[in-house]
Amino acid sequence: MLEVDSGLIEELLELLSSSGTEKRFLKRLEKYLQQLREEGEKAIGKKRDPMEHLKGSSSLCSMRFPLGVSNIRILFAYRNNKVYLLCAFYERQGHKNTEYDAHIPVAQKRLAEILGEK
């Protein structure tokens, strides 16, 4: 049910290593994955929900992990009852370098590689 890009693991380790929020993050990730397993596509809500479809990107979704001042985001795809965790980054309000636009191409490329597409 789950496929994780190796780049995502490195990104998460870097993001969490200095935050002190590893336990909260992992509990929430477990909750989100359980929701996807039980509810499938219905678990992915609208804008501002903890899991949402990305506007303008038919295949990508986002998980939100509010951990204080900054939110960790994971871009993922949900296809045929399988979750593909693709890219992780900090989302900081008002900081242009944390906007989705910089991370969507990375997630799309990783998904294509996992699925064996060119």
Image (cartoon, rainbow, N blue to C red):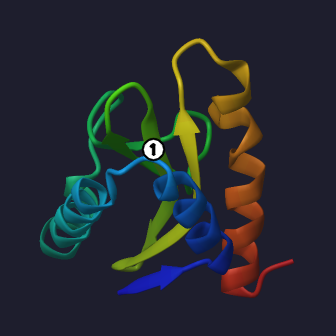
Front position in the image: 43 or 2: 2
Residue 59 rendering spot, x and y as whole percentages: 56, 57
Front position in the image: 75 or 30: 30
Name the image quarter holding the N terminus: bottom left
Q: Which residue was labeled with disc 1?
A: 72
Q: Residue furthest left?
A: 38
- Quarter of the view holding residue 87: bottom right
Examine the rendered structure and indicate whether residue 52 appears above or below residue 107. Answer: above
Kind of element beneath mark 1: strand
Residue 116 rendering spot, x and y as whole percentages: 75, 87
Residue 94 rendering spot, x and y as whole percentages: 59, 12
Q: Residue at x 31, y 34 (%)?
A: 46
Question: Within 10 angstroms of label 1, few (less than 14), some, or many (20 or more) residues?
Answer: some
Q: Does 1 sit left or right of 95 as displayed? A: left
Front position in the image: 102 or 1: 102
Examine the rendered structure and indicate whether residue 83 appears above or below residue 92. Answer: below
The amino acid type found where label 1 is placed reads: Ile
Q: Does 106 sit left or right of 115 as displayed? A: right
Q: Residue at x 32, y 51 (%)?
A: 21
Front position in the image: 72 or 102: 72
Q: Residue at x 20, y 55 (%)?
A: 42
Examine the rendered structure and indicate whether residue 11 appears above or below residue 81. Answer: above
Q: Residue at x 70, y 46 (%)?
A: 103
Q: Residue furthest right?
A: 118
- Quarter of the view holding residue 96: top right
Name the image quarter holding the C terminus: bottom right
Residue 24 rendering spot, x and y as whole percentages: 22, 54
- Count numbered badges in the picture: 1
Examine the rendered structure and indicate whether residue 61 appears above or below residue 5. Answer: above
